[in-house]
Amino acid sequence: MTFAATAGLGAIAGGTIFFGLPVGRARNLGVRTKLALSMLSAGILAFLFMDVGSEALGIIETRLDAFKDENASLWPVIGLFALLSVGFLVGVGGIATVQRRLGASARALAPIAGAESTMTMSPTELAEHRRAFETLDQRALRTAMTIAVAIGLHNFAEGLAIGVSAQAGEIALATVLIIGFALHNATEGFGIVGPLGGVRPSWRWLGLAGLVAGGPTFLGSMVGYQVTSGALELLFFALAGGAILYVIGEIWNGVRRYGHLEFGLYLLGIGFLLGVATDLVVAYGGG
């Protein structure tokens, strides 16, 4: 498979993430529907966390097996574990730090009393009321974009697998990987828009989120075709794992105010199983 063909098919695999994004523009979604989308996205992310964790450990365990067979020293194992640790901590703590600083830049607003009507508010109170809701909307959009970044890191590593397989001449495997990742990425769009709740993003925002999350599959396929690096793949798996874990916590905190937690947990399980089902296509091809 040529480089151009690999890059083109990698773009197709990443582009399917746009299939689920238009749901974010839907109007008049009920509370249970919002909860379902949020917890479905959390389930998909939970599967991705398991997936990137197993892939990262597999890279380290390969070097550990070489050490056990006395074919290599222990230093590569130690170095890869250090890389995994740094990437994972940056993925978790780094995003939390950025979110905290972004939140600190916005002035804390006093809550509006539940029984207070906007008809009785002064112009100043109305302005504060609007800013309060704008702050909540911005936080939801930041959380959703953080999900897009985490998925993008994961998809870059998937793109590396496509490129490596194509460069090695394993056309059948590369094709199955592309089909499997395309199906898998189609579900990840729901993972991005699920936590938005009542926020209706613009088409421009959805387009940017799709590029952030799906574009790395295209980039990874090109890099993987030309460069084979277990350390690079491990780093992106670690960053993705940390970011995904942070985002799952954010989603859980956000949906607790809705109630219906038992219903939400069932949806989380369905989202996880949906991720497993789409990944079986890749496993069938030996990916």
Image (tube, rainbow, N blue to C red):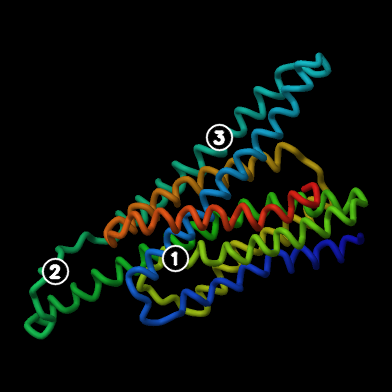
What is the residue that sits farthest to the bottom in this orientation?
119
Which disc, if any, is residue 37? Answer: 1
Q: Earlier in the sequence, mark 3 or mark 2?
A: 3
Q: Which residue is mark 2?
A: 112
Residue at 58 percent across and 49 percent down: it is: 48
Q: For the residues carrying marks 3 and 2, which lies nearer the camera in this image?
A: 2
- The reply to whether discs 1 and 3 touch (Cβ–Cβ < 8 Å) is no
From the top left corner, tell me how far across and down residue 271 is, in percent. 52, 57
Q: Quadrant of residue 130?
A: bottom left
Mark 1–mark 3 Cα distance, whole angstroms, equals 32 Å
Residue at image coords 72%, 64% = 13
Circle 3 residue: 86
Q: Which kind of residue does numbered mark 2 sit on?
A: Ile
> Mark 1: which amino acid?
Leu
Left or right: where 190 falls relative to 225: left
Specify the quadrant that holds the N terminus: bottom right
